[in-house]
């Protein structure tokens, strides 16, 4: 009976140990990415098989791009506020409102242009094939993929959230 | 002193014992009682074996056999490893998805969200 119990316990302990070992080995990469200073860039390195030199260059590009992007977002937020105030006070379309709308649209276009420039620059830093993959990925996952127009007929409508950095 | 139990020298007694055939008489309704006992034994409830007893018996007698013990340990290791692998894949996919979204949000503040 004792021997049977020992084997039974050994089996359970072995199963738990096997679970932990395989789980820890299997999640080593994601854990390392999460513990890195910039997890999202660590993901980029992992996803697009970047070498250390490429990764350093892309990190520099990323660090250079973000402050400019945030600045543009602040300007758009500012224009949004101004437009909102002008709309609250107005009962008709005024030249002021029209001006804010145009300025905001220009700022958004500029924001997207700069974003696209950044994507191209990053893709050129990567090996050719990975660069193509990266461009395909950003086309799919960023605002470059224009949302379908919706007049409320479709139940699966999408809306654009305000420009906001995480 | 005279021996009261001489060995093999009492021939008449020996012959008499050989001729003697006892005829025991069976008690009344003997056969019927025998069948009744058999019926009673057959209809008596078999003592129930609980699951715990079965398990204890298996643990004490079957599991310690080398072949079964090896198979048992192997299967449990395999189950543990498979569960760990499956969970690790799930976790890796979750973290990867989360980080890719974070990257997209970092470089593109115009992220869209689907509404039901």
Image: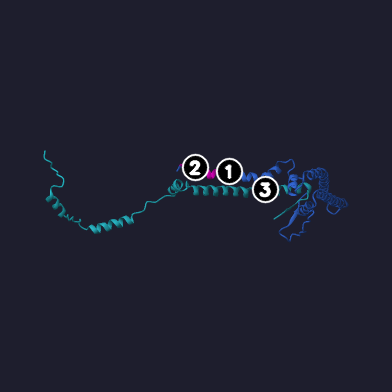
Q: Residues within 10 Å of mark 1 (few under 14, many from 20)?
A: some
Q: Residue at x 75, y 46 (%)?
A: A45
Find residue B33 and report its horizontal and vertical position in percent.
25, 57
Give me the chain that's cyan: B
The chain letter under disc 1 is A
The residue that label 3 is drawn on is B92
Q: Which residues are magenta?
A: A2-18
Residue A20 occupies which quadrant of the picture? top right
Q: How is the image coloured?
A: by chain
Q: Residue furthest right?
A: A95
The chain letter under disc 2 is A
Give me the chain that's blue: A
Residue B32 occupies which quadrant of the picture? bottom left
The residue that label 1 is drawn on is A17
Label 3, label 2: how far apart the Cα atoms are? 35 Å
Residue A62 inside the magenta-drawn segment: no
């Amino acid at each position: 009976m004792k021997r049977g119990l020992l084997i039974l316990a050994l089996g359970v302990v072995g199963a738990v140990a096997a679970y932990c070992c395989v789980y820890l080995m299997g999640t080593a990469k994601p854990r390392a990415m999460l513990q890195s200073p910039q997890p999202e860039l660590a993901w980029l390195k992992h996803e697009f098989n970047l070498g250390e030199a490429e990764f350093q260059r892309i990190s520099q590009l990323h660090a250079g791009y973000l402050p400019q992007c945030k600045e543009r977002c602040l300007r758009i937020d500012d224009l949004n506020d101004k437009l909102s105030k002008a709309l609250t006070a107005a009962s008709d379309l005024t030249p002021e409102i029209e001006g804010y709308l145009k300025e905001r649209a220009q700022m958004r276009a500029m924001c997207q242009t700069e974003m696209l420039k950044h994507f191209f620059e990053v893709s050129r830093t990567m090996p050719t094939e990975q660069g193509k993959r990266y461009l395909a990925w950003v086309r799919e996952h960023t605002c470059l993929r224009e949302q379908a127009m919706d007049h409320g007929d479709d139940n699966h409508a999408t809306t654009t959230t305000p420009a906001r950095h995480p | 002193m005279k021996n009261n139990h001489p060995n093999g020298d009492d021939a008449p007694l020996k012959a008499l014992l050989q001729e003697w055939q006892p005829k025991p008489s069976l008690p009344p309704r003997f056969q019927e009682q025998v069948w009744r006992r058999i019926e009673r034994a057959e209809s008596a409830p078999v003592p129930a074996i609980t699951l715990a007893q079965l398990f204890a018996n298996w643990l004490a007698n079957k599991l310690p056999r080398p072949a079964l013990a090896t198979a048992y340990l192997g299967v449990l290791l395999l189950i543990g490893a498979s569960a760990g692998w499956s969970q690790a894949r799930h976790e890796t996919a979750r973290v990867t998805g989360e980080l890719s979204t974070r990257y997209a949000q970092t470089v593109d503040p115009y992220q869209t969200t689907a509404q039901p």
